[in-house]
Amino acid sequence: MITTITLNSGNEMPLLGLGVYKATGEREVERAIGWAVDAGYRLIDTASAYKNEDGVGRGIQACPLPREDLFITTKIWNNAQRLGDVEGSFSRSLERLMTSYVDLYLIHWPVPGCYLSTWKELERLYEQGRARSIGVSNFDIRHLEELASISDITPSVNQIEFHPYWYQKKLVDYCQSKGIAVQAYAPLARGAYLDDDVICILATKYGKTPAQIGLRWILQKGVAVIPKSTQEERIISNGEIFDFVLEEEDMDAIDQLNRDYRSASIPDDLRDVTF
Ligand SMILES: NC(=O)c1ccc[n+]([C@@H]2O[C@H](COP(=O)([O-])OP(=O)(O)OC[C@H]3O[C@@H](n4cnc5c(N)ncnc54)[C@H](OP(=O)(O)O)[C@@H]3O)[C@@H](O)[C@H]2O)c1
């Protein structure tokens, strides 16, 4: 069973999605989307920076489901923000994705001096219905507060790195208190916690994989997940996280694993900025 979260835009967002970062091999992303849809995934997370929106578009076209049954997210990259080319970048994303709208359009990173004006442009896309929901990614509390001071539209989503090795509790609590849904990227920490003793003991206890334990912990924090895989078996098993519940003492044990571990790197063009 796949469940959803109701965004502040009124739209439903699946709690599980397929991440496709680095899926740029020959027909790699198309195949992954096919397996994911068969396994019950309905959300695909891409970005103009991933250079695979065209493959995602072909994957959607090949999918037997109507477009409305899918939830497609893409993101505006840093250079387009600096150039003030939000409309152009968005239109090119739509063309590559072969769709007339996206379900969620995100500011990929809070580029200093740019993200407030970028947000104003996203508001226009939202009002036109070409982006059904709009949101942000990699935003900290101070970025969100600044956004709130210039806009009446609260982001629907903040997509951030979140997993047992980086339990960003303060930021998640803040977002949830403001009605901003949190979506965890790198929810597997790109493998970093999959051989952790505590995670492995819990995997044995629940008869689940370490990845499923980590993803379930995230879900039970009220946070959506977008694990990436282009391997059929992993795509299927990463989605089997709605049929068990971690007990409170096990949730607490995973809470203790935090080490502020960042698995995704800050882009080169933002390296000297404090996040
Ligand atoms: N907004 C942002 O700035 C941002 C940043 C990073 C990522 N993202 C999004 O979040 C998605 C997920 O993050 P991510 O791709 O960085 O990391 P991730 O989902 O934590 O980990 C992906 C890695 O784990 C492997 N993997 C997947 N399932 C596995 C399993 N069951 N057991 C062992 N290994 C497994 C994958 O390899 P295989 O493919 O070979 O299975 C891949 O190498 C991205 O694809 C992207 O859509 C957003």
Image: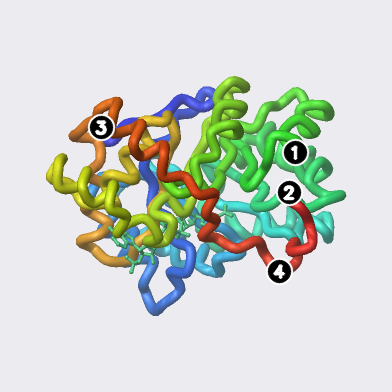
Q: Report if the beta carbon of the residue with label 4 is closer than 8 angstroms to ligand 1.
A: no
Mark toward the start of the polypeptide (2 vs 1): 2
Give the number of the disc on residue 246.
3
Q: Residue 156, how many percent across, how many down?
A: 59, 31
Mark 4 falls on what kind of element? Answer: helix
What residue is shown with label 4? Answer: 268
| Residue type beneath disc 2 | Pro
Label 2 crowd bin: few (<14), some (14–19), many (20+), radius 10 Å: many
Element class at badge 3? loop
Determine if the C-beta at disc 2 is less than 8 A from ligand 1.
no
Q: Earlier in the sequence, mark 4 or mark 1?
A: 1
- Residue 64 visible? The answer is no
Q: Which sits earlier in the primary sequence, circle 1 or circle 3?
A: 1
Q: Nearer the viewer, residue 192 or 158?
A: 192
Displayed quadrant of residue 125: top right
Q: Which residue is mark 2?
A: 110
Q: Residue at x 75, y 40 (%)?
A: 119
- First along the sequence among labels 2 and 4: 2
N-term-proximal mark, 3 vs 2:
2
Q: Are marks 3 and 2 in contact (CB under 8 Å)?
A: no
Report the amino acid beneath label 1: His
* Distance from the alpha carbon under mark 4 to that under mark 1: 20 Å
Residue denoted by label 1: 143
Total marks drawn? 4
The answer to whether residue 122 is left or right of residue 106 is: right
Amino acid on which the number 4 mark rests in the picture: Asp
- Above or below residue 183? Residue 12 is above
